[in-house]
Image: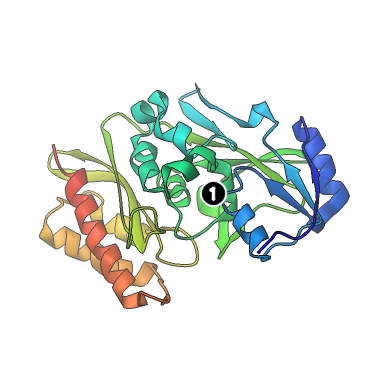
Amino acid sequence: MKAPSFAYVKPRSLPEVLEALAQHGDAAKLLAGGQSLVATLNMRLSAPEILVDLTGIESLKGITTQDNKIRIGALTTHRAIEHSAEIKKHLPLLAQAAPHIAHVAIRNAGTFGGSLALADPAAEWPACCLALDAEIVIAGKKGERRVKAREFYRGLYETALKKGEVLVAVEIPIPAAGTKSVFLELARRQGDYALAGVAALAKHSGGKLSDVRLAFLGAGPTAILAKKAMAAAEGKKPDAATVQAVQKQLGEELSPTDSVDTSAAAKMHLARVLCGRALAALAQE
């Protein structure tokens, strides 16, 4: 199929973007990497009157370090994150997750901010941002505001973004020294959306886990920070009893649904298996 007819504008500054959104309202769609939007246009699942192309705004690109935080611009590509020395050094969880995103051609074009704003529950970046306690930077006509990742995701493809606002960056605190991270997911084929996945961080000292963070993808209408499961692992030895207790808690926190080829029960089982593997990996010296 072909995309429906639409107007097109490519602003050169963020104020111009915000003005375009204010002028056109719900009739406008933002274009970043286009890896999701172009497909929905061609299938006529989206029919905007105008596309507002963000790619000419240099201030929305790049990775910087300041005040013990990493700031990732919304237009930074998945591939740039995958190969960033700063990311590998300070936020290895993102470097571990990036190769799971689709295929290289898509990672070359798709953007960090675009993925977060779409809020697909099976995408990698939302879960990583939950695990890393990231802060989403949002711009609007009234100025900037910041929203914690744990408050950003409201429901299936629903976020805290308001009409006329743009996700401009993400700021992530650099984890404390000694923090280990692991990202695991299972998909039917490399590049497919995950059936289940987990982004995990913790310290392992004196044989016990601390500062445990467990965020799951593909396990509900949004990425899920499994607080009860985290509590079950906190301060404990990562032995079989602890793993079993953590896995049990997941039954109360995750809410996968049936899909065409995989049952909710199977997804729950996979999430529990991945959680056990993640805890084991975090406990390795």
Residue corresponding to mark 1 = 115
Residue 71 or residue 17, whichever sits in front: 17
Instruction: Examine the rendered structure and indicate whether residue 184 appears above or below residue 135.
Output: below
Residue 275, above or below 263: above
Residue drawn at 41 percent across, 59 percent down: 193
Disc 1 element: helix
Instruction: Give left or right: position of 254 versus 39.
Output: left
Q: Point out the residue furthest to the right here.
A: 23
Q: Give the image quarter of residue 273.
A: bottom left
Can you say which quadrant of the picture contains the C terminus?
top left
| Residue 224 percent coordinates (x, y) | 43, 59
Residue 213 visible in rendering: no
Pointer 1 local density, CA inside 10 Å: few below 14, some 14–19, many at least 20: many
Q: Is residue 8 left or right of residue 193?
A: right
- Residue visible at 20% across and 40% down? 204
Q: Amino acid at mark 1?
A: Ser
Residue pushed farthest front?
1
